[in-house]
Every structure is written in structure tokens, then in C-alpha cells.
Image (tube, grey):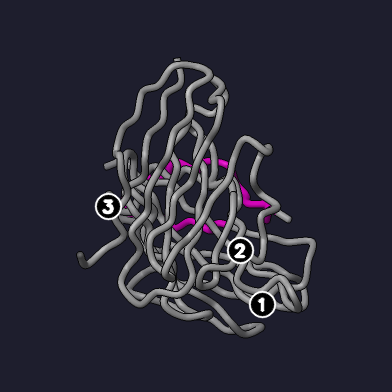
């Protein structure tokens, strides 16, 4: 596709369940970013990838959060044993060059009951 | 380190001007500006890479004072379509390049 694609667009889960959020970046984009946006809040940095490597994982809130990227393309953000405070919109963005703009996906809205 | 934006919110009448500021405690490599409308993804406005450089598009422009680690976004003769939340994102220099950290945002409301 032409843009960044995220799935699912909406996910409702029960506390304690694991969830996987997927991001398909723009083809050829080497850098990929994950952000979390809680209701009315800013964009909280989670992690970014250069190719398949994650130089900076400092934004991951806890060890329940993990992310991987394979083939320099698709990325998956996994949240284990979800908690209610994990409820947020998870945004993915990709970037074609180190001085380029970020292209954001529409986000995955996660609701933990 | 997250950049600090001010003001947190601003309300304008159509045709008025506004300035949104962004500051960092770290030396910066670049500053990005994005606008997000309610329920939508953030959309790119501009990137500033050099100290003192000013960029503009139509009636929206920005400056970047590298020495002060500050950037400002200028919206002149605001239009209804300018309403949304504006985010600045910063990349630090030396070793932390490419990690783009955003401020908490400035909510801009333009009324008729």
C-alpha cells in the first residue's frame, strides 16, 4: 500500500491477556517508530528500529512490552498480561531517510477491560 | 528527553496569528512539527535542520535557534482548517540521532 498500515484498528481485551499489534511500513522505509497516545495526551516514544535492529528501547514502559521487526519491514508490538493502564492508541510511523519526515499510520486503539 | 511546548492551548478567531514554542534541554540535531486533528494520525508540517533556519509553507512557518535549543511555529492569518493539536518532535545530536521524541502538544482552536 501507499501508506503505513496498522492492524487491528481496534482491539478490546480482558486484563491479563496478551495482545499483538502489527505495523506495515511504507515499502523501502528503513526506520520504524512506535508511539503510545493516551486520551488527550502527547505522543509517548516507545521504541524505534533501524532495519531490524532497535538501537533504543528506553521508552518501553515495562518488561511486559516487546517489539520486533523482521525483514526490515513488518513490525509487531506485543503487550503481555495487559493492564488497564495499557489502554491507549498505539501509533506506528516509518521514515525513508534519516532526515526525512515520519509517516504515521492510523493507529491501533487498545482497550483493556 | 521530552521537549517542552508552550502554550498548552490557544484559542483564536479566524484571521488571527499564533506562535507555538518548543524547547529542549539537550543539543538538537533537528526539530519536526506535526499537526493532528481529532481522531486522525499526525501529519507532517516541516523539519528544521540548521540553526537559525526558517522554513515556511503558505502561512505557516517555523524557526530553529540551535544555540538556544528552541523552535517556534508561526501561524499567520489563521484559518478554520488550522485547528488541531500541534506537536514538536526533537532529535538530539551525537549518538541519539533518529530517536524522535515529541512534546505534549499544543491544542489550537480557530473559531469563526
Q: Measure the alpha-carbon separation of dots 1 and 2.
A: 20 Å
Q: Is residue B33 above or below residue B36?
A: below
Element under disc 2: strand
Q: Left of A56 or right of it: where is B84?
A: left
Expressed as whole percent of the image width and height from the top left, the position of residue A33 reads 50, 59
Q: Measure the alpha-carbon separation of dots 2 and 3.
A: 37 Å
Q: Residue furthest front?
A: A71
Disc number placed over residue B81 in the picture, else none: 3
Asked if the residue under mark 3 is in contact with the one under mark 2, i.e. CB atoms within 8 Å, the reply is no
Few, some or many residues within 10 Å of mark 2 (<14, 14–19, 20+): some
The span shown in magenta is B2-20
Q: Earlier in the sequence, mark 3 or mark 1?
A: 1
* Residue under the point 40% across and 42% down: A21
Q: Which residue is mark 1?
A: B29
Element under disc 1: strand
Q: Is residue A96 magenta?
A: no
Residue A12 placement: quadrant: top left
Asked if the residue under mark 2 is in contact with the one under mark 1, i.e. CB atoms within 8 Å, the reply is no
Disc number placed over residue A54 in the picture, else none: 2
Q: Mark 2 or mark 3, which is nearer to you?
A: 2
Expressed as whole percent of the image width and height from the top left, the position of residue B96 reads 71, 70
Q: Is residue B99 above or below residue B93?
A: above
Q: Left of A109 or right of it: where is B101?
A: right
* Residue under the point 53% across and 37% down: A41
* Residue under the point 70% across and 73% down: B28
Q: Chain of mark 2?
A: A
Amino acid at each position: 500500500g501507499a501508506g503505513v498500515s496498522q492492524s487491528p484498528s481496534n482491539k478490546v481485551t480482558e486484563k491479563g491477556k496478551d495482545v499483538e499489534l502489527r505495523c506495515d511500513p511504507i515499502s523501502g522505509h528503513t526506520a520504524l517508530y512506535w508511539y503510545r497516545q493516551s486520551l488527550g495526551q502527547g505522543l509517548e516514544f516507545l521504541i524505534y528500529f533501524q532495519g531490524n535492529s532497535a538501537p533504543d528501547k528506553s521508552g518501553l514502559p515495562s518488561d511486559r512490552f516487546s517489539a520486533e521487526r523482521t525483514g526490515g519491514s513488518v513490525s509487531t508490538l506485543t503487550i503481555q498480561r495487559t493492564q488497564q493502564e495499557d489502554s491507549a492508541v498505539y501509533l506506528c510511523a516509518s521514515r525513508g531517510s534519516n532526515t526525512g519526515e515520519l509517516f504515521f499510520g492510523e493507529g491501533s486503539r487498545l482497550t483493556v477491560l | 528527553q521530552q521537549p517542552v511546548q508552550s502554550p498548552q492551548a490557544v484559542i483564536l478567531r479566524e484571521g488571527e496569528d499564533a506562535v507555538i514554542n518548543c524547547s529542549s534541554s539537550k543539543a538538537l540535531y533537528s526539530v519536526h512539527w506535526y499537526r493532528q486533528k481529532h481522531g486522525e494520525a499526525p501529519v507532517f508540517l516541516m523539519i528544521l535542520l540548521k540553526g537559525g533556519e526558517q522554513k515556511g509553507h503558505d502561512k505557516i512557518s517555523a524557526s530553529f535557534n540551535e544555540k538556544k535549543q528552541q523552535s517556534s511555529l508561526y501561524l499567520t492569518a489563521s484559518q478554520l482548517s488550522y485547528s488541531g493539536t500541534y506537536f514538536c518532535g526533537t532529535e538530539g545530536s551525537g549518538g541519539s540521532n533518529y530517536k524522535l521524541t515529541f512534546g505534549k502538544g499544543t491544542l489550537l482552536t480557530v473559531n469563526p
